[in-house]
Image (spheres, rainbow, N blue to C red):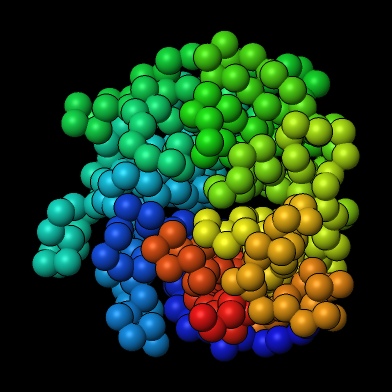
Amino acid sequence: MQGGSSGIGYGLKYQARCISDVKADTDHTSFITGTLSLREENEVHLIRLSSGGTELICEGLFSHPNEIWDLASCPFDQRIFSTVFSTGESYGAAIWQIPELYGQLNSPQLERIALLDAHVGKINCVLWWPSGRHDKLISIDDENLLLWSLDCSKKAAQVQSKESAGMLHYLSSGAWDPHDVNAVAATCESSVQFWDLRTMKKANSIERAHIRKANYDVKKKHMLVTAEDESGIHVWDLRKPKIPVKELPGHMHWTWAVTCNPEYDGLILSAGTDSTVNLWLAPTSASDESTSGSITESPTQQADPLLNSYSDYEDSVYGLAWSSREPWIFASLSYDGRVVVESIKPFLSRK
């Protein structure tokens, strides 16, 4: 199904690649995003969906010293987030805190809680455990996976353990298993590696070329979805990692991002360099087909996993985030700095 956009837009001043749901804000549907300008001072925008769901409101606008390549909101404190940034010559990562009275200040400044400064090479991402309060962080660079101990009250982060992926592997991103605090998936050019944080050793892998991103299913254990440059999207049961349980066609060009819905089984969002966001329905077993009654399906839609294609973008879409508070809402971010918030309610049954 092809469709334009009926979504709500919000424009950033500069180019951007990353957006995150502010999961810890249980009172509002809100997102945080950051810009990627080489020459200008970059910005972090805290955006809230209005109570009527008709407009996006800027709750806070903060300067950030460098280009933001990765951004993630802390899942248990709505004022804390991480960024991976580039100075143009090197990469760094830091944990930031939004000032408490930011709405009443003329030019509020972000407070840097901790610098994740143990990396030598290019840092790719910082991971928070998605399922609750946890004092550990993970950062991934081209060659290494680092486990940090974070103490926000003392404004300190210390490396707890570090391990190399090996000379033959080039790490690009990762995902922390919401069902197992000791399990992390790291993507590289030829595989997904699964790490046990207790031993900092690789426990298993999926051999697959050009995986761009991986995302765990929050609702189901052992399920992982991967986005691959040219071969689309694959759904994996990690108990049987040799072949995927589902294959989806992905995008006309590279599939850049993929994320599972936090509430509705089988609903997957993907984004790509073809300037589209796709909404998929991909239940992973016969029992799922019968229990996914919350999804409106016709006989033709059962055969076609693509529920909708949102095509109202003029640039590559790199950022995707479901709302944890209202899981029928998602935000997307295209490289030209355009945020669009959409509702998938037309694809949910009206009970």
The furthest residue to the top:
199
Residue 96, position as x, y percentages in the image: 31, 44
- Give me the residue at 61% from left, 45% from top: 220
Q: Is residue 250 above or below residue 53?
A: above
Please name whichever residue, 116 or 245, is drawn nearer the observer in this view of the structure: 245
User: Quick check: can you spot residue 337?
Assistant: no
- Give me the residue at 75% from left, 40% from top: 237
User: Quick check: can you spot residue 147?
Assistant: yes
Q: Is residue 184 above or below residue 324?
A: above
Residue 199, position as x, y percentages in the image: 57, 11
Q: Is residue 242 above or below residue 143?
A: below
Residue 255, position as x, y percentages in the image: 76, 58
Residue 106, position as x, y percentages in the image: 15, 67
- Give me the residue at 47% from left, 49% from top: 71
- Give me the residue at 31% from left, 32% from top: 114
Q: Tell me where residue 74 sits by quadrant.
A: top left
Please name whichever residue, 143 or 297, is drawn nearer the observer in this view of the structure: 297
Of the 4 image quadrants, the one containing the N terminus is bottom right
Q: Horizontally, is 126 left or right of 113 in the view?
A: right
Please name whichever residue, 137 or 34, is drawn nearer the observer in this view of the structure: 137
